[in-house]
Amino acid sequence: MPIRFPRNSETRWPPALGPLTVIRDFKANPVGTQVAVLRGLLARAAHTEWGKRYHFAEVAETNDPMKVYRERMPINSYEAFRTDIGRIRNGESDITWPGTFQHFAISSGTASTGKIIPLSVEMLNINRRFTLSVALSYFEATTDPSFFMGKLLSIPGRIEEDPLHPGTMIGEVSGLQFLFAPWAIKKFYQAVPQEILFLPNWDKKLDAMVQHTLNTDVRAIAMVPSWAIVLFKKLIAAHNVATGNSASTVREIWPNLQVFFSGGVALSSYRALLEHQVGGPLDFMESYGASEGYVSFQDDPRSTDMLVHLNSGVYFEFEPIDGSGSRVSIDGVETGVKYRIFVSTCSGLWGYEVGDVVRFTSIKPHRMVVAGRTNEMLDKYGEAVYGDEARTALGKACEATGAQFSNFHITSLPVSAASLPGHEWLIEFESEPTDLDVFSGVIDDHLQAVNRHYVIRREAGAFRSPTISPLQAGTFHSWLKSTKKMVSAQTKVPRMSEEREIADALLKISGNNT
């Protein structure tokens, strides 16, 4: 059953069906669900400025609205919305979506220069149902309710009243979403009170969270995995200071920790290290969401791909990143192809390019993995190495050499009269490899096995093997604090750059003589 949007944009959307029933329905009828979502979005926004401009009411009534919409609605970058979003922030109504907005997510940059995404009340309530879907899917897959018997530790991002637009809230989507979490979860299940969760200083917030939960029965965690690594270190250190013990794992402090609900960055890069810190296997449930809306989620901890949520207030379109095909809806996707992803949403985004690259692993049902960002590729010398290939290669190298890492960045090495072009891998290791040459070799072998552009250049002797540069502990965190006005739950480290600005700064902080 499609989402029914309320007539008044200020009214909270009441879900007509339970989250698991919604999932079963779109799995049984994926194309019909997406058609219904598109029709609902177009009809709801028909009388807005964008709706009149692109004749939404007419498109919604056509026999094939997906085809007609694709023909009429161009792909739009953020710049196509920037002026209108400025008007929306000033309180104007009925521009991209009916009514006015009171919630704005900072997708990147700052409130003054970055990408600001309006979030409707409908979207925030639909997102709430999505998060419940993940938890209930985990329970359905495991039939183990024990994670409900303790506490959930989550880290929402920072939000505040916009000083330039009184009466509106602005900040990170996870913080805004926390406002719409079920009251019972916030009152009885959340491990840390709201006054700690919204402390403005990131390091002080983590320290306060640790102190508050030292003697708490934490059984579930929901946060960005890169920050969990930092939190776990602080937790173990604080526990040992408080007790005089010498604990080395999280489960010595939280013995009933069972499940990690992950989002924000690719889990694959951090899973092994997190399990090492925890002290054994841990269930993971990864979700893929952005400020623009939620896309997919891991509905079974035994899987590694994610089920695409086709009834979450978002209409999806895809285009092969290599230019081999045209833009398609969910009925036209194929497995194994890397796609750009575009969304039209109940927050008034239309044909909007999210900036991520996804790859479908299944179409019955539709499952995907995130292959990286559209700009997460190194191709300065025609090698065309994507983020997912690099992450997999890094994981294999760690497995082969007993290494563990917390952060990494890959950049291009310049060509000179004395050296071939190549890549430099700057890695902050938790445990260094037994042999850096073997580590580099495993990365090189994997990239040659999966990437024809890379192997051609290696076989032709036109590209050197990876250079591995270990960094001192804390280098990436120091870089974030020195380059970002505010470090928070959603602050991310760029994984790839063809330019050396980030790499050179990291090397300088670490004290590498390069």
Image (spheres, grey):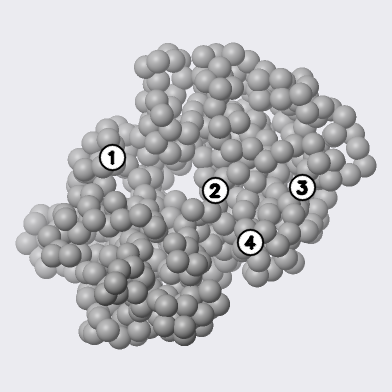
Residue at left offset 8%, top offset 57%: 241
Q: Earlier in the sequence, mark 1 or mark 4?
A: 4
Q: Nearer the viewer, residue 465 or 261?
A: 465
Judged from the image, the secondary structure of the residue bearing numbered disc 4 is loop
Q: Identify which amino acid the numbered label 4 is placed on.
A: Asp
* Quadrant placement of the C terminus: bottom left
Classed neighbour count for the residue bearing mark 3: other residues with Cα under 10 Å, few (<14), some (14–19), many (≥20): many
Q: Residues within 10 Å of mark 1 (few under 14, many from 20)?
A: few
Residue 34's mark?
3
Residue under pointer 4: 322
- First reached walking from the N terminus: tag 1 or tag 2: 2
Place of residue 11 in the rendered image (x, y in percent of width and height, measured from the top left): 64, 23
Relative to residue 418, is residue 179 depicted above or below? above
Q: Residue at x 24, y 85 (%)?
A: 435
Q: Looking at the image, is mark 1 or mark 3 earlier in the sequence?
A: 3
Which label lies toward us, 1 or 4?
4
Whether label 3 touches label 4, CB < 8 Å: no
The quarter of the image holding the N terminus is top right
Between the C-alphas of marks 1 and 4, the distance is: 33 Å
Mark earlier in primary sequence (3, 4): 3
Q: Which residue is mark 2?
A: 355
Residue closest to the far front: 417
Residue mark closest to the camera, 3 vs 2: 2
Q: CA distance from mark 4 to mark 2?
A: 14 Å
Q: Residue at x 78, y 59 (%)?
A: 332
Badge nearest the viewer, 1 or 3: 1
Q: Amino acid at mark 3?
A: Gln
Which label was assigned to residue 484? 1
Which amino acid, mark 2? Gly
